[in-house]
Image: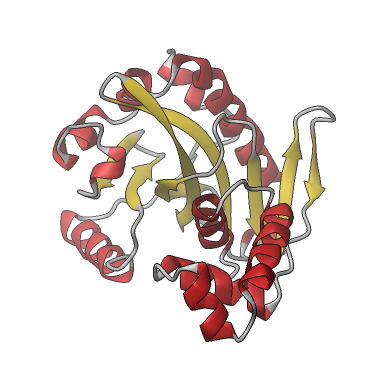
Amino acid sequence: MNIHKLFNEWNKVTDTDHFSEEQIAQLIHLIKLILLDEYESFYIIDYSQKRFVYVHDNPLFLCGHSAHEVQDMGYKFYDRYVHPEDIPFLFEVNEIGFRKYRELSEEDRNKDGYISYDFRIKNGDAYFPVRHTLIPLIKNECQEIVWALCKVSLTDQKHPNMIMAKVGEKEILWNRETKCWDEMPSPQLSEKEKEIVRLSVQGFTEKEMSENLQLSESAIKKRKKILFQKLHVKNMSEAIICCTNKKLF
């Protein structure tokens, strides 16, 4: 893997403020407090220095290493632990994601946003898919992204085929055939469907759900089937992950 391919004209930083070690420590501490109850792993990238500033100790992204070891590896971590077939995909994401950001209007750049995509990382002798969400954290006066927060969670996707971004309230999906961004409508779940997902998270059986929601068990099964179709998933575990990632409940 040529790590330098991850740095291009779209994500270069031409001017940056220098932060003291104390300022960096304070910012990281604040982020840790905010994400304290999150189940995801997360780390912080400094694009100006081309390094990992911080790596959380959640084992999901560590591949058997300590957080400090992964931080020291920096971008070499991708070379060692990302599935070889997914490396070109990461190059693609890196280019089109930052290019899209540069093409945004100044107003849209100031809106909350992120880009999210899936790839596989190594765990022992096998690979498993994760969802990687990159959120601009610090920008310079030129609106270039200096630091980014990267959140890593489990995903219902088996192969890297989805690149999704959000700008403000608008979600867009990269169409790999047309090489264009398409606006993506968010799945609309009924209150009953949301309750079924919430109760599933709590471990309720279909019988217990029927009593709680005052529906028959057959009605619960039917609503689950419709729910899976809306979310394009095969089971409740995938539905829970999908709803969590899309913040549908």
Position of residue 139 relative to residue 38, above or below, is above
Left or right of 213 on screen, residue 3: left
The answer to which image quadrant residue 242 occupies is bottom right
Residue 108 locus on image (x, y percent): 69, 61
The quarter of the image holding the N terminus is top left
Q: How is the image coloured?
A: secondary structure
Q: Nearer the viewer, residue 75 or 249?
A: 249
Left or right of 112 on screen, residue 108: right
Q: Residue at x 43, y 46 (%)?
A: 154
The quarter of the image holding the C terminus is bottom right
Residue 217 locus on image (x, y percent): 61, 71
Q: Residue at x 73, y 57 (%)?
A: 230
Q: Residue at x 34, y 63 (%)?
A: 38
- Residue lying furthest right in this view? 178
Position of residue 77 relative to residue 57, above or below, is above
Q: Nearer the viewer, residue 22 or 62?
A: 62
Q: How many marks?
A: 0
Q: Residue at x 26, y 70 (%)?
A: 33
Left or right of 191 on screen, residue 47: left
Left or right of 201 on screen, residue 65: left
Q: Is residue 168 visible?
A: no
Residue 155 locus on image (x, y percent): 49, 44
Q: Is residue 21 visible?
A: yes
Q: Nearer the viewer, residue 193 or 75?
A: 193
Position of residue 216 relative to residue 223, above or below, is below
